[in-house]
Image: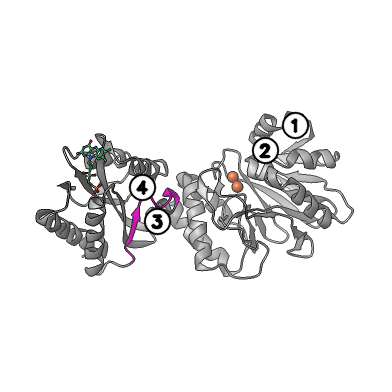
C-alpha cells in the first residue's frame, strides 16, 4: 500500500516487525522500517528499495503508487543491502528504468549486481536532474555511513532524501504528520551513535553542506519523515552527536560482575553521585544491557565509570567488548573513572585504561579504585572520595 506525502510524493517503504537484530547486531524490539519513496512527475523516480525479505511487499507498494505508469529512474543513496537488495527485482520488472548512481556506488552495484551496471546514469556532486516540475540535486555525504553515500535534494519542494542520516530504529508509521516523541529520539540516538557515530567529522561536513539549503521535509531510509520543528530538533542533536559534545553533564556507570561484589561497588558509587546532586546517573550491567544502549548513553553523557572484575588475567569479556566499542565509536573527550576488582591480582583497571586511552581527549578524573574480592571500609571511603571528585567535575565547581 502506498501512502501519500504530498501531491506527487509517495511513501512506498515497508515495516519489518519480525527482525530481532538489525545488521545482525542491534536489538530492535520494535522492529525497523526500510523506507522508499516515489516522486511522480513527467518522469517517475524511485528513491532506494527495501530489504530482500520484503521485495514482494515493496514492489506491490510501488505498483500501487505508480498506478499503471513505469519508473524512469531509481536513485541509489548507497548500496547497503537493507535498501538495495530489491534493486535487481525492480530493474528486471522495469527494463527501461535507469539507475542513478555515483562513481563509487557504481562499483558497489557491480559487486552486488554485475548485470545492472550498463543501465546506470552516473552523477557527480552537485549535478542536477530535471524530471519535470521537480529538479533533483545530488549532494554527496561520503562515509555517512558508507563510502558512496549521497543525499538527494528536491529543490522544488525542499525535500531532502537523507539516506541513513536522520534515521531511527522502530517500525513506526513513517509517513505521519505527528511530531517525534522522546522515545523516538532515544532510538534515533541509539541508531545514529552505533551505526553512524564513528564518522562524526564526515557527518559535520554533510550537515554543513545541508545548512545552505532550505529543507522543509527530511525523508530518511529508516524511521519517521521529519517535518517542521522536528528538523531543527534533530539537526541540533546531530550537531552534538557528530561533534561528540555531551548532551548533559552526568555519569553513566557500567559494571561487569560475576558474583555481585563489583556490582555492589558500582551501585554504591551511583547512589553517592545521586546523593551529591548529579542528575540522571545511569547504571548498566554490561552482561545484561546490549552495548548499543550503553554506547548511546556514553555519547549523551560527559562522564563514564567502568567497573570490572579481573577475569582470567583480563577484563571481563562483556566489559572488554564494551570498552573496545567505545574506542571503535570514537567517543572522544570523555572523562572516565575506573573501578577494578580481583581476588588474586586485580588488573582490569590498567587494561581498561590502556584501551580507552586510545581515544583522543580521554582523561581520568582520578586514580582507579581497586579492591580485593569484596568492597570493604577502605573501598567505600575510596568510592566516597571518587563520588565527590566526579560530582565536582560534573557540576563544574
Ligand atoms: C573464571 C574466573 C576467572 C577469574 N580470574 C581472575 C584473575 O585472573 N585475577 C583475579 O584477580 N581475579 C580473578 N577472578 C576473580 C574475580 O575477579 C572477582 O574477584 C570475583 O569474581 C568477585 O567479584 P564479583 O563478585 O564482582 O564477581 C576470576 C573469577 C572467575 C570466576
Ligand atoms: Fe546504510
Ligand atoms: Fe539503512
The residues tagged by marks 3 and 2 sit, at their Cα atoms, a distance apart of 35 Å
Q: Which residue appears at 74% of the width and 46% of the height?
A: 55
Secondary element at image label 4: loop
Q: Are marks 4 and 2 in contact (CB under 8 Å)?
A: no
Q: Which residue is mark 3?
A: 297
Badge 4 local density, few (<14 within 10 Å), some, or many (20+)? Answer: many
Picture quadrant of residue 14: bottom right
Q: Are marks 3 and 1 in contact (CB under 8 Å)?
A: no
The quadrant of the picture occupied by the N terminus is: bottom right
**Foreground label between 4 and 2:** 4
- Residue 262 image position (x, y, % from top left): 24, 51
Respond yes or no on whether mark 2 lies under 8 Å from ligand 2. Answer: no
Q: Which residue is mark 2?
A: 102
Query: Reading the chain from its start, which is encountered first: label 4 or label 3?
Result: 3
Evaluate whether residue 48 shows in this view.
no
> Could you say which disc has been placed on residue 378 in the image?
none
The residues tagged by marks 3 and 1 sit, at their Cα atoms, a distance apart of 42 Å
**Foreground label between 3 and 2:** 3
The residues tagged by marks 1 and 4 sit, at their Cα atoms, a distance apart of 40 Å
Picture quadrant of residue 349: top left
Q: Quadrant of ligand 1?
A: top left
Badge 1 local density, few (<14 within 10 Å), some, or many (20+)? Answer: some
Left or right side of 326 for 205:
right
Q: Which residue is mark 1?
A: 117
Query: Reading the chain from its start, which is encountered first: label 2 or label 1?
Result: 2
Q: Residue furthest front?
A: 259
Q: Which residue appears at 57% of the width and 38% of the height?
A: 147
Amino acid at each position: 500500500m502506498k501512502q501519500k506525502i504530498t501531491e506527487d510524493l509517495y511513501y512506498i517503504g515497508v515495516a519489518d516487525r519480525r527482525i530481532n537484530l538489525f545488521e545482525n547486531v542491534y536489538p530492535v524490539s520494535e522492529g525497523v522500517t526500510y523506507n522508499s519513496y516515489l516522486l511522480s512527475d513527467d518522469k517517475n523516480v524511485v528513491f532506494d528499495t527495501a530489504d530482500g525479505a520484503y521485495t514482494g511487499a515493496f514492489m506491490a507498494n510501488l505498483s500501487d503508487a505508480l498506478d499503471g505508469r513505469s519508473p524512469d529512474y531509481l536513485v541509489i543513496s548507497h548500496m547497503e543491502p537493507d535498501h538495495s537488495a530489491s534493486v535487481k527485482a525492480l530493474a528486471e520488472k522495469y527494463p527501461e528504468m535507469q539507475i542513478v548512481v555515483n562513481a563509487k556506488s557504481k562499483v558497489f552495484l557491480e559487486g552486488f549486481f554485475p548485470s545492472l551496471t550498463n543501465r546506470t546514469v552516473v552523477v557527480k556532486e552537485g549535478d542536477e536532474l530535471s524530471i519535470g516540475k521537480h529538479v533533483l540535486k545530488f549532494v554527496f555525504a561520503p562515509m555517512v555511513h558508507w563510502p558512496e553515500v549521497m543525499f538527494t535534494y528536491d529543490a522544488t519542494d525542499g525535500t531532502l532524501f537523507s539516506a541513513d542520516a536522520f534515521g531511527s530504529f522502530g517500525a513506526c508509521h513513517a509517513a505521519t504528520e505527528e511530531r517525534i516523541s522522546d522515545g523516538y529520539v532515544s532510538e534515533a540516538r541509539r541508531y545514529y551513535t552505533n551505526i553512524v557515530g564513528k564518522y562524526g567529522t564526515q557527518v559535520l561536513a554533510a550537515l554543513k553542506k545541508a545548512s545552505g539549503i532550505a529543507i522543509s521535509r527530511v525523508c530518511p531510509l529508516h524511521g519517521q519523515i521529519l517535518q517542521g520543528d522536528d528538523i531543527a530538533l534533530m539537526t541540533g542533536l546531530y550537531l552534538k552527536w557528530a561533534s561528540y559534545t555531551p548532551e548533559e553533564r552526568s555519569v553513566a556507570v557500567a559494571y561487569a560482575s560475576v558474583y555481585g561484589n563489583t556490582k555492589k561497588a558500582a551501585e554504591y558509587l551511583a547512589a553517592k553521585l545521586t546523593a551529591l546532586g548529579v542528575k540522571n546517573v545511569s547504571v548498566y550491567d554490561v552482561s545484561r544491557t546490549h552495548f548499543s544502549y550503553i554506547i548511546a548513553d556514553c555519547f549523551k553523557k560527559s562522564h563514564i565509570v567502568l567497573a570490572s572484575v579481573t577475569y582470567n588475567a583480563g577484563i571481563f569479556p562483556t566489559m572488554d567488548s564494551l570498552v573496545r566499542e567505545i574506542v571503535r565509536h570514537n567517543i572522544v573527550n570523555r572523562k572516565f573513572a575506573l573501578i577494578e576488582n580481583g581476588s588474586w591480582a586485580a588488573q582490569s583497571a590498567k587494561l581498561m585504561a590502556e584501551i580507552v586511552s586510545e581515544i583522543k581527549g580521554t582523561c581520568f578524573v582520578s586514580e582507579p579504585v581497586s579492591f580485593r574480592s569484596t568492597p570493604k571500609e577502605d573501598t567505600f571511603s575510596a568510592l566516597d572520595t571518587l563520588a565527590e571528585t566526579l560530582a565536582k567535575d560534573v557540576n563544574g565547581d
